[in-house]
Image (spheres, rainbow, N blue to C red):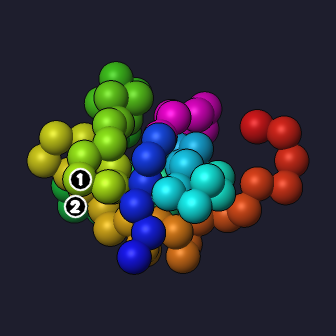
Amino acid sequence: MREIIDVKPLKDYKLLLTFDNKEQKIKDMKPYLNKGVFKKLNNLNVFNSVKIAFGTISWGDIDMCADALYESSKEIKEDI
């Protein structure tokens, strides 16, 4: 089971995720922005408030599974 040890919000609703194996990946959150509780993330202040909680990412009442993020995020192949 993977854990996220660091998260940085990037431009264009992307996140730089650092996992416990030191691997870094990019998660594009744009596909989620019109779905359910994720609609709150359209507000950049809310999106940029992302934090680490219990080995995954959280925006207070919104969180995501670290393993799912690991599987669905893209490997970094260019400069961020």
The residue shown at (52%, 56%) is 19
Amino acid type of the residue that numbered disc 2 sits on in the rendered structure: Gly
Q: Residue at x 44, y 69 (%)?
A: 2
Q: For residue 71, what is the image quadrant?
A: bottom right
Q: Which mark is residue 8?
A: none
The residue mark sitting in front, 1 or 2, is 1
Disc 1 element:
loop
Q: Is residue 44 above or below residue 26?
A: above
Q: Tell me where residue 60 appears, x and y as whole percent.
A: 16, 41
Residue 11 shown left or right of residue 35 in the figure: right
Q: Nearer the viewer, residue 9 or 7?
A: 7
> Which image quarter holds the N terminus?
bottom left
Q: CA distance from mark 1 to mark 2?
A: 22 Å
Residue located beneath label 1 in the image: 54
User: Considering the image in quadrants, where does the C terminus appear?
Assistant: top right
Mark 1 vs mark 2: which is more N-terminal? 2
Decide: few, some or many residues near mark 1? Use Cα within 10 Å; few <14, some 14-19, many ≥20: few
- Where is residue 13? Give x, y as percent: 52, 41
Q: Residue at the top extreme?
A: 45
Q: Which residue is mark 2?
A: 36
Q: Position of residue 4 (x, y in %)?
A: 43, 54
* Residue 78 located left or right of residue 7: right
Q: Residue furthest front?
A: 21
* Residue at screen point 47% across, 40% down: 7
Magenta-highlighted residues: 7-13
